[in-house]
Image (spheres, helix red, strand yellow):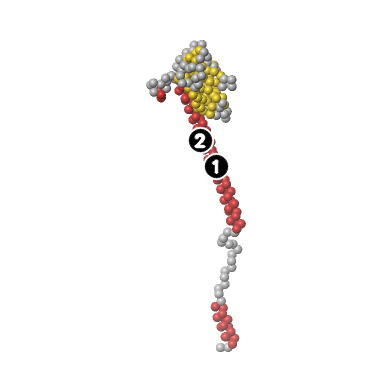
Amino acid sequence: MTLPHRIAVRRAQCASWAPAARPALSGTSAGFTLVEILVALAVLAVLASFAWRATSALVDGEARLASEAKRWQSVDALFARIEGDAAAAIPRPVRVPGGREAAWIGTIDANGQSGFAFTRAGSEAEGPAALPARIAWRLAGSVVEVAYWPHLDRDAGATPARYAVLDGVARMAVRYADDDGAWSDRWAPQDGRMLPRAIAVALTLADGNRVERVMVLR
């Protein structure tokens, strides 16, 4: 074998032992860059903020609706209680220091707020032995309250027990209808036993809403 031939063989053997050439890297990377990750996090933060605001608004809305429903239930309960008391009114005047008080009296105080007092028959809920009671309804400040006297005929210095029924009321106006259907904002009949034929109780709430209920007594 000649020298040139041996050199050619050796070169061929070296070429067979050389490692295979690596493929060229493409221009794109399989992972995410730091900038891409930060942008994604920012987008997620914005979406989370929108979701939180929507959820908060929904919860606040439900709370307001629940509060409104509770308030109107309280107003309805007040009217139901007044109507139940008024329906049990009886024509029984009471003796007070210095004279007699009509079975039903309706007045307006110095602040222009209506109030009324009357004699009510014994409540069935109190049992068959329940006695008639003298009660009164009025607006004290922003609270509608009911008062109960311990006895129908009272001595000087007798004070009623007062109970708050509804808060958040700005005005209370009451009208009274006589047997001829005429309405008045006061009730002071000459006949102390005479009761109104109907009453209309109007409440103006602190937020400006006005509610009126007409109640037929007889």
Q: 67 and 12: which one is in front?
A: 67
Q: List the single residue furthest toward the bottom.
A: 1
Q: Amino acid at mark 2?
A: Ala
Q: Which residue is mark 1?
A: 56
Where residue 55 appears, as percent x and y from the top left, is 54, 43
User: Helix, strand or loop at disc 1?
Assistant: helix
Q: Nearer the viewer, residue 28 or 192?
A: 192
Q: Is residue 133 visible?
A: yes
Count of residue discs: 2
Please report the residue visible at 51 percent of the width from the left and 31 percent of the height from the top: 71
Which mark is first along the chain, 2 or 1?
A: 1
Could you tell whether 207 is left or right of 83 in the image?
right
Residue at the spot 60% in from the left edge and 63% down from the top edge: 27
- Residue at far top of view: 190
Q: Position of residue 108 (x, y in %)?
A: 56, 19
Mark 1, Cα crowd under 10 Å, few <14 / some 14-19 / many 20+, is few
**Picture layout, residue 3 above or below residue 74:** below
Amino acid type of the residue tagged 1 in the rendering: Ser
x then y, percent, for residue 60? 54, 39
Evaluate whether residue 211 shows in this view. Answer: no
Percent x, y for residue 6? 57, 85
Q: Secondary structure at mark 2?
A: helix
The residue labelled by disc 2 is: 66
Local crowd size for mark 2, using a 10 Å CA cut-off: few (<14), some (14–19), many (≥20): few
* Quadrant that contains the N terminus: bottom right
Q: Which is more toward the observer, 197 or 134?
A: 134
Q: Quadrant of the C terminus?
A: top left
Tags 1 and 2 in contact by the CB under 8 Å rule?
Answer: no
Report the Cα–Cα distance between label 1 and label 2.
Answer: 15 Å
In the image, what residue occupies the spot 50% across and 19% down? Answer: 158
Look at 55% across and 29% down and name the residue there. Answer: 168
